[in-house]
Image (cartoon, rainbow, N blue to C red):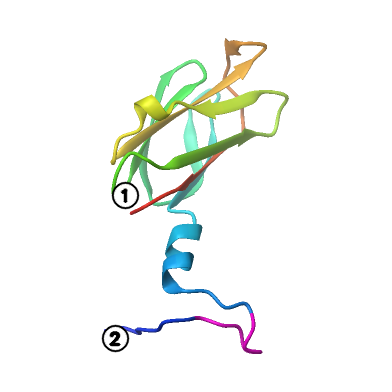
Amino acid sequence: MSTLKVNNLQDINGANNSTPEQVAQGRAKAWVRFDGSGTVSITDSFNISSMTDVATGRYSFDFTNNMANANYVVITSTVEDSDGGSDPNEYTTSTFRVFVTDDGNFTDRDIIHAVVFGDQ
């Protein structure tokens, strides 16, 4: 196995310069698309080892590779007319939770997404 060490990355035309730090800080550290209704299940994911159906409209996820700290960002969305969110007070280095509401009430939805950005 080899290690490539560089100070800058550019596209083939010498444009779009990025440092390795910018690449590491800007890419998603985890993401998940899941079915949150009926028998909940992960449809596809990156760096997510498991999912727990906590309660109606509330879900918990475990990272395959933990975050460096609990100061990360989780962005959520649903394809139906609902609000998705997460509670930073429930973030740990190994787990995060998301929720879905409709008119202020927790609800299950078929397609839900979550993306995590932060230090790892």
Q: Residue at x 33, y 39 (%)?
A: 70
Q: Which numbered disc covers residue 2?
A: 2
Q: Which residues lie in the magenta part?
A: 9-15
| Position of the C terminus by quadrant | bottom left
Q: For the image shown, how many numbered marks are present on the structure?
A: 2
Q: Which residue is drawn at 29% across and 44% down?
A: 69
Q: Where is residue 113 in the image (x, y as percent from the top left)?
A: 57, 39
Q: Residues within 10 Å of mark 2 (few under 14, many from 20)?
A: few
Mark 2 or mark 1, whichever is nearer to me: 2
Q: Residue at x 31, y 49 (%)?
A: 64
Horizontal placement of 81 versus 104: left or right? right
- The earlier-in-sequence mark between 2 and 1 is 2
Q: Which amino acid does label 2 sit on?
A: Ser
Horizontal placement of 31 versus 71: left or right? right
Label 1: which secondary element? loop
Quick check: 7 above or below 96? below
Instruction: Find residue 108 and report its image quarter.
Output: top right
Q: Which amino acid does label 1 sit on?
A: Thr
Residue 43 magenta-highlighted: no
Label 2: which secondary element? loop
Can residue 74 be seen by looking at this rendering?
yes
- Of helix, strand and loop, which mostly describes the magenta segment? loop
Residue under label 1: 64
Instruction: Find residue 16 and report its image quarter.
Output: bottom right
| Position of the N terminus by quadrant | bottom left
Q: Position of residue 65 (x, y in %)?
A: 30, 52
Q: Residue at x 35, y 85 (%)?
A: 4
Q: Which of 2 and 12 is in front in this view?
A: 12
Q: Position of residue 26 (x, y in %)?
A: 50, 59
Can residue 112 be seen by looking at this rendering?
no
CA gap between label 2 and label 1 equals: 23 Å
Q: Which numbered disc covers residue 24?
A: none
